[in-house]
């Protein structure tokens, strides 16, 4: 066998090993997701605040691992001012929580048709407070990134102790960059931030910027990555670091 053939065989074997490992990782994630689905379904049965318990994870929606983590966080700490980016399955939980505990919650969404569909799909069983903000492309660190228009004025002087970031659609770089600005100016002293899709480069860059903003403001925090079919991170003020281990 010549050198060229040996090199070709090496790369074919390397590709084969990579494919096997990726296949095993996907199988492990699917098994974990199945376990999370069972655990979530059992956990919410006795919940007083989560009265309407129908959820439809998957595709563009978050997965059961995310929903289970979100439910556990809500069970372990009472938040007083909630903000969510992207209307979806998590909104069903966020707004039922807000109604039960009589605290404000806002979901930012750009799509009027999706808002109407969601309200009909939930049969208007509980109010979903939506702030409609159009999408825009902005420059951040030399890259174009998609965000919501008017974030600064929409939430000026407001402090949130819970922020969930699952919108807008992802960007190649600094995806969902609105959370960077909010981390600099709109976090309460005690807070929890959840950012979805952190397996993607754009969200990873944004998370790094959020951490820099917290450090620059002298804010001590804890961070944990969760692996589901899609990965997400939980970032909490140091006094809530136990939430990163749920």
Image (cartoon, rainbow, N blue to C red):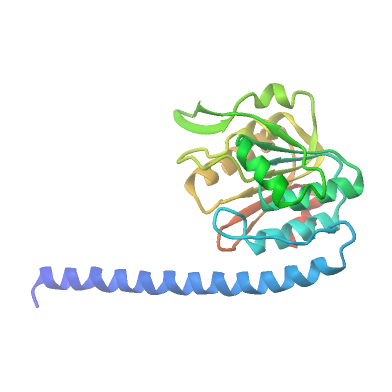
Q: Quadrant of the C terminus?
A: bottom right
Query: Which residue occupies the foreground of this view, 172 or 86?
Result: 86
Farthest residue toward the left? 2
Of 147 and 95, the residue lying toward us: 95
Residue 222 visible to an observer of this rendering: no
Q: Residue at x 65, y 34 (%)?
A: 213
- In the picture shown, does residue 145 fall above or below 36? above
Q: Quadrant of the N terminus?
A: bottom left
Percent position of residue 24, x then y: 46, 74
Question: x%, y% of residue 104?
Answer: 84, 38
Query: Is the residue 184 above or below the residue 100 in the image?
Result: above
Residue 39 position in % (x across, y down): 73, 72
**Left or right of 228, for residue 215:** right
Compared with residue 47, is residue 125 higher up or lower down, i.e. above or below? above
Q: Decide if residue 129 is on the left or right side of residue 168.
A: right
Q: Residue furthest bottom?
A: 1
* Residue at 75% over, 31% down: 186
- Comparing 187 with 165, the one in front is 165
- Res. 113 in view: yes
- Image location of residue 73, percent across then percent down: 79, 56
């Amino acid at each position: 066998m010549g050198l060229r053939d040996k090199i070709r065989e090496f790369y074919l074997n390397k590709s084969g090993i990579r494919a096997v490992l990726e296949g095993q990782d996907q199988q492990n994630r699917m098994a974990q997701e199945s376990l999370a689905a069972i655990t979530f379904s059992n956990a919410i049965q006795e919940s007083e605040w989560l009265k309407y318990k129908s959820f439809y994870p998957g595709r563009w929606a978050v997965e059961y691992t995310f929903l289970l983590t979100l439910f556990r966080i809500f069970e372990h700490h009472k938040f007083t001012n909630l903000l969510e980016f992207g209307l979806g399955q998590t909104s069903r939980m966020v707004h039922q929580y807000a109604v039960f505990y009589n605290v404000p919650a806002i979901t930012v969404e750009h799509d009027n048709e999706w808002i109407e569909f969601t309200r009909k799909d939930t049969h208007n069983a509980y109010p979903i407070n939506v702030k409609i903000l159009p999408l825009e492309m902005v420059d951040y660190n030399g890259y174009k990134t998609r965000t919501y228009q008017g974030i600064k004025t929409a939430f000026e002087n407001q402090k949130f102790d819970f922020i969930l970031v699952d919108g807008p659609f992802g960007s190649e770089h600094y995806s969902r960059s609105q959370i960077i600005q909010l981390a600099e100016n709109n976090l309460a002293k005690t807070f929890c931030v959840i950012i979805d899709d952190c397996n993607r480069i754009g969200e990873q860059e944004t998370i790094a910027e959020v951490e820099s903003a917290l450090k620059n403001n002298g804010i001590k925090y804890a961070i944990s990555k969760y692996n589901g079919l899609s990965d997400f991170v939980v970032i909490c003020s140091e006094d809530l670091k136990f939430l990163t281990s749920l």
